[in-house]
Image (cartoon, rainbow, N blue to C red):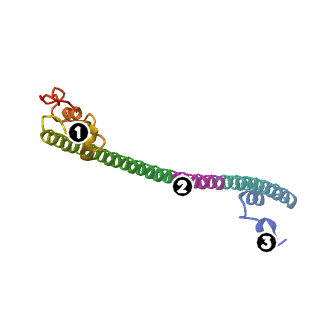
Amino acid sequence: MNGTADPRVLLRGITPEIDRAALGADDDQALEDRILRSSLTTCIALGEQARRLEEWRLRKAEQDAKMRELIRQNSDAIRQMAMLEESLRQMTLRAEAADRGKAEAERSAVVALERAAREAEAAKVEAIERARGDAISGFLAWGGELRSTSNGCPRSSSPRSTSGVMGPVWSGFPERASSIMMGANFSPKPSFTGRWP
């Protein structure tokens, strides 16, 4: 066997185990046994590394799956949060619109009540003024009729005969006129002798 074909020379420097086996081999069979044992050890180590690499790959895939699930859940949570925010915004807008409507209704009710109160007060004042004017007119007409009598008695025998002057409400007018014009202590009956209408 020449130097180039010697396996101890060819295998020298590949691994420390093979190198030591090549340097310390007594014969070719012992060298082959040592090379086989070293190769087997190397294969076992490579297999263990491959197994660990596969386990790491599986763990990495599982972690990636969990991460994708977390991302999906976060995306769902973000969408739900956006929906809740939009719902809350719509509810706020509706509440503000309801408050504005309520305030407007209250203002309208107050305005209507004030207008009704003013109209009622104006109607009351108008009715009082009209009644006062009617009372004054009737009282003056009654006094004129008294002055036109010959002996302190009216020409007519019945107070209702003056309905052309005072209307059908003349009956009992002096008492009503006295309460309006002079107060309750005023007596409408003049001091004259004769027949009271």
Q: Is residue 53 left or right of residue 92?
A: right
Callout 1 amino acid = Ser
| Residue ID for mark 2 | 82
Looking at the picture, how far across and down is residue 141, in whole percent?
Answer: 18, 43
The quarter of the picture where residue 152 lies is: top left
Disc 1 crowd, CA 10 A, few/some/many (<14, 14-19, 20+): few
- Residue at left 23%, top 34%? 176
First in sequence: mark 1 vs mark 2: 2
Q: CA distance from mark 1 to mark 2?
A: 97 Å
Q: Quadrant of the N terminus?
A: bottom right
Which three-letter amino acid code belongs to the residue tagged 3?
Answer: Gly
| Residue tagged 1 | 156
Query: Which residue is identified by label 3?
Result: 3
Could you tell me the amino acid type at mark 2?
Ala
Which of disc 3 and disc 2 is earlier in sequence? Answer: 3
Q: Is residue 25 above or below residue 129?
A: below
Magenta-highlighted stretch: main secondary structure?
A: helix
Q: How many marks?
A: 3
The residue at the point 73 percent across, 64 percent down is 14
Q: Which residues are magenta?
A: 68-87
Which dot, 2 or 3, sits closer to the camera? 2
Q: Quadrant of residue 33?
A: bottom right
Q: Quadrant of the C terminus?
A: top left
Real-space Cα distance between discs 1 and 3? Answer: 178 Å
Question: For this view, does 12 lie left or right of residue 37?
Answer: left
Give the farthest residue toward the right. 29
Out of 129 and 47, give the one closest to the viewer: 129
* Gap between marks 2 and 3 measured at Cα: 81 Å
Decide whether residue 83 is among the magenta residues: yes
Location of residue 114 in the rendering, given as x and y in whole percent from the top left corner:
31, 46
